[in-house]
Image (tube, rainbow, N blue to C red):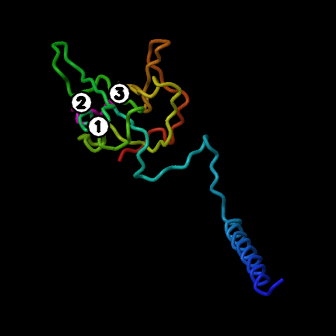
Amino acid sequence: MSSSNAVGYLAGIYQGFSGTIKGLMVTLRYLFKPSITVNYPVAKLKPYDRFRGALLFDAVTCIGCNLCVKACPSDCIDLQNMTTPEGKKIAKVSWYSIDFGKCNYCKLCEEACPTKPKSVWHSLDYENVFFSRHEMVRAWQQGDPWCGTYFDPADKKYRVSQEQIPIEEIPARR
């Protein structure tokens, strides 16, 4: 065996050994830090304030101006104003729906909303539970929960999604 082959062999052993020691040092450094494991799905990590989660709607605050419908580039928002018996529109909303299958979470609807606090806003919920295409279209009217209702074609009535686990009971508006 020549001396250059022996030096190359020993250099390879040294590189392998030093790489192993570097990896073990990283492991040793994190070994004594507290864990960040969360008991998911019972407990969820709260995302940053600028996070764009699921859209929520407050039918009491909404004035039915249709600015969110006009601002939506995906055409996923539908709004129906209340009317008087004579057929004149009132500044209240009768139905409001969002199709989460089309929504791209751009936040233009929230920025267009003139009410204080906002009647449509992004929550901090980073997951929505949908088991069918019908559940992706959420609708709100006065008295509905924050997550909205969906139309069940089998029963021909609106239902609240029981599988949805919100991060907060009443999400903060920004």
According to the picture, the residue beneath numbered tag 2 turns out to be: 64
Dot placed on the residue nearer the N-terminal end, 2 or 1: 2
- Residue at position x 80%, y 83% in the image: 6
Residue lying furthest front in this view? Answer: 2
Disc 2: CA contacts within 10 A as few (<14), some (14-19) or many (>=20): many
Which of pointers 2 and 3 lies earlier in the amino acid sequence? Answer: 2
Residue drawn at point x = 72 percent, y = 76 percent? 15
Numbered circle sitting on residue 97: 3
Up/down of 7 relative to 55, above or below = below
The chief SS type of the magenta part is loop
Which segment is the magenta one?
Answer: 59-67
| Residue at 32% from the left image edge and 30% from the top image edge | 59
The quadrant in which residue 136 appears is top left
In 3D space, how far apart are the residues under numbered discs 2 and 1 (Cα atoms)?
15 Å
Could you tell me the amino acid type at mark 1? Cys
The residue under the point 62% across, 49% down is 38
Decide which of 13, 164 is in the foreground and name it. 13
Q: Give the crowd class for mark 3: few <14, some 14-19, many >=20 residues within 10 Å.
A: some
Above/below status of 34 relative to 151: below
Secondary element at tag 2 = loop
Q: Earlier in the sequence, mark 1 or mark 3?
A: 1
